[in-house]
Amino acid sequence: MPANTSFLQDLLTTIAERGRQLIPQSLIGGGRRDDIQALAKALLTSQGEASGVAIAREILTKYRSMSVEGRRAFVRFVAETMQPDRESVLRAATSFIASPDDASLSALQAAVESPRQEFFRRLNLAPGATGEIVALRADLLKQGRADPALRGLDQDLQHLLYSWFNRGFLVLRRIDWQTPAAVLEKIIAYEAVHEIKGWEDLRRRLDPADRRLFAFFHPAMVDEPLIFVEVALTDVVPGSIQAVLGEHRKPAGTRMAPTVAVFYSISNCQEGLRGISFGNFLIKQVVEELVRELPTLKTFVTLSPVPGFARWLDRELAAPEAANALIPPADRSALAALRRSNWADADDEGDSLRGPLLGAAAAYFLRARTSDGHPVDPVARFHLGNGARLDRLNWLGDVSEKGMREAHGLMVNYRYELDEIEANHEAYENAREVAASKSVRSLLRAPEKPRSDVTRRLPSPGR
Amino acid sequence: MPANTSFLQDLLTTIAERGRQLIPQSLIGGGRRDDIQALAKALLTSQGEASGVAIAREILTKYRSMSVEGRRAFVRFVAETMQPDRESVLRAATSFIASPDDASLSALQAAVESPRQEFFRRLNLAPGATGEIVALRADLLKQGRADPALRGLDQDLQHLLYSWFNRGFLVLRRIDWQTPAAVLEKIIAYEAVHEIKGWEDLRRRLDPADRRLFAFFHPAMVDEPLIFVEVALTDVVPGSIQAVLGEHRKPAGTRMAPTVAVFYSISNCQEGLRGISFGNFLIKQVVEELVRELPTLKTFVTLSPVPGFARWLDRELAAPEAANALIPPADRSALAALRRSNWADADDEGDSLRGPLLGAAAAYFLRARTSDGHPVDPVARFHLGNGARLDRLNWLGDVSEKGMREAHGLMVNYRYELDEIEANHEAYENAREVAASKSVRSLLRAPEKPRSDVTRRLPSPGR
Amino acid sequence: MPANTSFLQDLLTTIAERGRQLIPQSLIGGGRRDDIQALAKALLTSQGEASGVAIAREILTKYRSMSVEGRRAFVRFVAETMQPDRESVLRAATSFIASPDDASLSALQAAVESPRQEFFRRLNLAPGATGEIVALRADLLKQGRADPALRGLDQDLQHLLYSWFNRGFLVLRRIDWQTPAAVLEKIIAYEAVHEIKGWEDLRRRLDPADRRLFAFFHPAMVDEPLIFVEVALTDVVPGSIQAVLGEHRKPAGTRMAPTVAVFYSISNCQEGLRGISFGNFLIKQVVEELVRELPTLKTFVTLSPVPGFARWLDRELAAPEAANALIPPADRSALAALRRSNWADADDEGDSLRGPLLGAAAAYFLRARTSDGHPVDPVARFHLGNGARLDRLNWLGDVSEKGMREAHGLMVNYRYELDEIEANHEAYENAREVAASKSVRSLLRAPEKPRSDVTRRLPSPGR
Amino acid sequence: MPANTSFLQDLLTTIAERGRQLIPQSLIGGGRRDDIQALAKALLTSQGEASGVAIAREILTKYRSMSVEGRRAFVRFVAETMQPDRESVLRAATSFIASPDDASLSALQAAVESPRQEFFRRLNLAPGATGEIVALRADLLKQGRADPALRGLDQDLQHLLYSWFNRGFLVLRRIDWQTPAAVLEKIIAYEAVHEIKGWEDLRRRLDPADRRLFAFFHPAMVDEPLIFVEVALTDVVPGSIQAVLGEHRKPAGTRMAPTVAVFYSISNCQEGLRGISFGNFLIKQVVEELVRELPTLKTFVTLSPVPGFARWLDRELAAPEAANALIPPADRSALAALRRSNWADADDEGDSLRGPLLGAAAAYFLRARTSDGHPVDPVARFHLGNGARLDRLNWLGDVSEKGMREAHGLMVNYRYELDEIEANHEAYENAREVAASKSVRSLLRAPEKPRSDVTRRLPSPGR
């Protein structure tokens, strides 16, 4: 029985409505209109209090219509001119050093607060501004991180967006064939793992009774998913993406009682929210939703790509044997067969490669480390950091061109076991311990050595 | 024709839904459960990343069930223990002084950031947390501002809430007889200017075709209005609240073409959002909504109380005549009649009082100032600060017990004229100039003197 | 994942929207506007095809503004003038008799079809018309059933409304504290069994976690419940309404796992839908909704009044003893004590009355019959006809003034047992068998006699 | 302030919700389950009262899964066995002839009422039944109208659906890019005039600011549009569909103030509702909606095909000249050029054909008549019957293969002028007068003769 939610639902409608609001022309004087920098300054002054909504709207409209160079100039203007007053900061810092108490700390905090943050808070007064601020940060990120002023601006923006996109404000929605086309086309565009090839392909991902697609939204960006996950409901843990996405598979009927939920694709949608992580929350809340809807579900696994494997293996094989104990000598020569483009089609080849390749993959996950001690694989870092366990390595799990190129066809399952999540997470955070099933561990081909000997140091993963 | 908004509307439903979500019990170990301080610490550590939602939920549940003393102790615990590390701040401050560049500034900003803010951001992970954090701040405000640690905590909370309750995230809703009872009962409870005496009285405020009630909501607090305004649609600017709220007035039919919108009551609802101002935005957006719905509307005025008038006048009359040029000597004796309790009923009395009283009121608005140069009346400061003009003083505009006691029956109209708002606001902000109509100015009874001579300095208005 | 349902609200919007539609004035000529009869005729002609919506709207507006006499005259006009053409019927009847085949039957069906039905179908073109047509039938029913033309009109209207208010078009809604006030006030007004004394009393009926209120709505009458049922969730079958509605009872928390659902009040709301039964469907669908929401529920019972008992007992006791074997002679004198107004307060009295009174009640339900063989009690006829079983008689179950007056305090529980419903219903329909528990049967005090001997014939229950 | 309207979505939810309802298995006995005829009989008896919803659901599920032959057999079973009892009808007819009064008429009406109607009313108890009953009628219509029993059944079904799909129950919805994909794909499928070639083509029809698409829905069939109209907003009355639907046209911006609304495509969606007309209401309500949204709109025209023109012209040209005065002799030879497949591309040909072809078209609309006096063109009959005026003939208005084949490229504009609608409609209904502009009349090439001379009698248009 549905709760009466009509009132709640209505709340959001005005957001769209406000987009159409009449901006009182009187609130904006003549000449300033042409000068986005003057408008930006006005927004930070007392004028911003009287006419803030209109000024903010004007700035965003102007920004959107500017050339790439114009946008860069404006972003630099904000970065450079809306900084804390250095003299004030020096004074406050000096006072704090002289007398480090609550009052001087408060004063120092106030002095260092960047006017750039207040600028963006006021920019957000305009209807629809939140999405445009996110887009502005995406523009900024394209300029790289060389310039310290821009880096500072990005830091301010990330800080602000981290606060605004707090998980407590996000709304989880199931996306299905009843979802507006305006949202569905974004799903097609944003899918980053297994491409969606048009509307019919999309329908196969979300319409059948044994498929689910969930996304997080922010109330101020209602058309724009922030992140989404695609789920297959089934009875067995699948070992290949072909089994999940095959065009001719027969969907389960509505009377199924699935026991396994497979998270087979997770896509971040907003470049402008880089560094603000939703995936962890998304997976856990989707598990809750699914359990509530389908109490027969007992197993929650991913079917995940291994994007760094082939590159890592190339490097390992290229390195002098002596420097490397991760790949046993016997396997090194067997693995040379991977250079042949169609090795997967040759049955014999496949059989003789299987052991060495899975062994190398086990080493890749369990022993290889970046210079700061993390696993090399970015997807592994994500799921292990969330408390999942590496459960199974799948030989030829993705035979697409991309799958073969990046991972020699390998896919893996990470498993989310409610009872272990916190312990796995803690062990990973504190000691970089990789939670893995026995079956994965048993694939290792070389005896474990003291880590300091065997690890090939790779660069630390950035954000 | 309505826009298709079903999808947007649905977004909010999960908020309610999430309130019912199953918190995985496994995520919370046994003993800690009893210790809100241990939970709060865990929330700030890596455990908070794995089990944040559940821990946050537990903290809030515990907090809600605690005694006043328990709550105070917990608030103090957060205030005192979640402070920036002083050593780190000292180091960063010293570095900045040595070399004040972008990098050292960034480092200093990071060092002074209060862990209390991150604590509340993580607390907000729990479903329904936002409203409870606002309530926690209301608890905190009750403890006063004497303790510097609590003051710092409040500063952090206000900063965070100011960012979260950015006007860009607020949603304007019309409240009417189709609104859920759960919201309507809040309107009855929160009306702070002209008390609503039960459901029938409420209906008279929002159901007739010539009445409107608008409120701001935040998407994460859907049942809770933040601020609301009551509006009467009419053809004349009313001079008394009796004319607006009389029980036996005949509502205009639906075919009316009103020309005047009267904002006769504005109430802030959330004590925990004190210092975060919505009123300015509310009035301006409601003007826009009304213009769109009813293009015949041309005049936007308030019918406002004068809460500080009687107290100010008492003080003026009690002061030695010589020290005071705001009330002419002749009027001082006439005004003595105000001491009689039923002067308003005596026709003669009324007539002879009218001139002196309105003259005193004109002086109260136009000449009296606080020590920092603001008008004495708090309602005047609000509307003048928004760019409104003081338009008319209304003799016996509110003959209720409260109206007579606080303002000798006086009510006033502030007028919002789109063309003037920005100029009025600027003149007020920069020079404390009070925008007033000729008719108000003409009520002054004593010649204007240089301000330094005549102003009785009152304490500055706090927030 | 929530099912989203702003059904009511959105229906409302559509109606409101349509209510504002511009009726093209050109579509209605001058003089006709004053003449509702001319308008009604026009609606049935080809003009009705071009301007039907506007003409229908005009008729309904006029009708609503007319005096009682005016309305009666209009209703009579419709009843008398919009009849099938008798000549055509005679011809078609004659043809059919001459040659009774499919074609002549079709022709006869067409000939007897009452233009009154088409009139009301066209009247329904106007926005909001459905509710007004229902109200018009309520007006008609007040005029009694003496006049054959009016009776025929009522028959047509009932036939039409029976088709329009088909259960397949009704929507079940939970009514709670999130429901719009406009609907809630109707619930207060329409409660017909246990009066709701204002908004606080209403809240006690629908807000606590252990209470539910469900109503059927029609999409074209969104503000108007058609019928509603109030439910208490509990652990025991209650024996008194005081236990259910006591002001100071402590509601169960949200973590309860109730096993019993008690339907303690069912109210029909629309007099104009008299004779069109929804109660059967309502109870069964509410059972389904409750089972889905709360799988712990195992027992579904009513707590029902016995509105005809006291009157029936008076009649039985007044009749000569010989003519009546339903009350044993010994009990007749004991029951005389019921004449004392406060017998229920006298403990001794109560004890000695209990057996005879419950015995008489058992006879009332199990043996007394109307002239057409139905049980005497109208509530019993409803629940038994739906397939329920008479489960328990409750001594002093309703000590309100009304309960004592109508039923000497008696209340009963009917039980809905899924496995028995169809069999009970069939036995009742075919043989007037009353399904009753052993405990009720055991209360009988006189040996059963052949029915023809013992039944006091009462008038048959009309609708 | 927005009108809120998640109507569709919410209706959907209710249906989906009901679709999941637990049908109490106990309510349906074993053997009957296999026998749709036994179930159908049970539905009409007292069992239908106790278990109607479940039995109805079962019948519909069975029906859907049956072969075409099975369905035909079932439909025939209903048609033949659920007829009025002929004996009773004979008795009632005889009584009425003997004494034709209100009572005997009522009795006759009751006797002839077809049990088939009650059968479908009870079938409608099942969730989602309405759409399935409409589909069943579509099945029935495929069987043709030869069999009188089936014809009678269709008559009953049409009568019932006419009552259920009363315009007062229909809901107008704007369809746009925010509409659920499940509805949009129906629009693609049902477009019957100018094919929609996939999702991008669809988007061009409803997403740009100068396009609208409106549909009628019934609350019990929420996914299924009943009829829809596509509208272009512009500044000139377009003369060709290429101008409206050209892929590379530049949509007007949102700040346009269009003056002309062009209805360029109207599609009925439900074959099972044949004979129940919505188009008239749809056009008029869409005009109202558009006027409300865009008060600058002054002109409402269609851009319509002329589906019968080429066939009619062939016939005229094939007939002996003497028998036909609609095409002047000189034009007959000129029109022979139409036989060349690419005449439209030959500039000279085009010029010399223009006059004769438009002249023939004017005769087609203004003079040609069916045997019962209607215009020959079905689209013309629809718009003229609604009160529109034939406004303009457009030479080469549709150069698609279909447009050339059916109408030698001709398209026409019908104009809806509020002031004339009723008069045009009446003149058409009463005297078959065709409202046409002077410009159309001036295209006629032969002098008007008495109609009886010139009209080529064509078969009357059935539905």
Image (spheres, coloured by chain):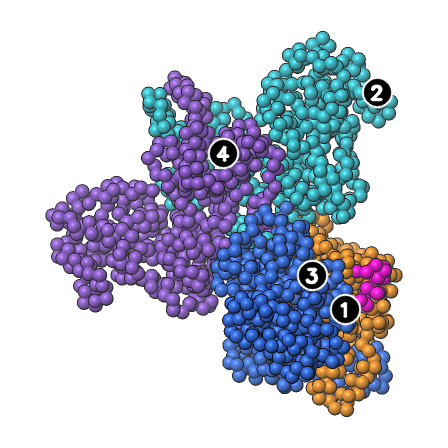
Chain colours: A cyan, B purple, C blue, D orange
Residue C71 spot, x, y in % from top left = 55, 81
Considering only vertical position in the picture, is B17 above or below A409? below
What residue is shown with label 4? Answer: B36
Q: Nearer the viewer, mark 4 or mark 1?
A: 1
Kind of residue indicated by mark 3: Tyr
Magenta span dominant secondary structure: helix
Which portion, as a residue range, is magenta? Answer: D28-42
Do the residues at pointers 1 and 3 share their chain? yes
Q: Residue sitting at 60 percent across and 43 percent down?
A: B21
Q: Nearer the viewer, mark 4 or mark 3?
A: 3
Q: Nearer the viewer, mark 2 or mark 1?
A: 1
Is the residue marked by circle 4 packed among few (<14), some (14-19), or many (20+) residues within 10 Å?
some
Q: Which is more N-terminal, label 3 or label 1?
A: 3
Question: Tag 1's secondary structure?
Answer: helix
Q: Is residue D173 left or right of residue B303?
A: right
Kind of residue indicated by mark 2: Ser
Marks 2/3: CA distance? 69 Å
Marks 4/1: CA distance? 63 Å
| Host chain of mark 1 | C
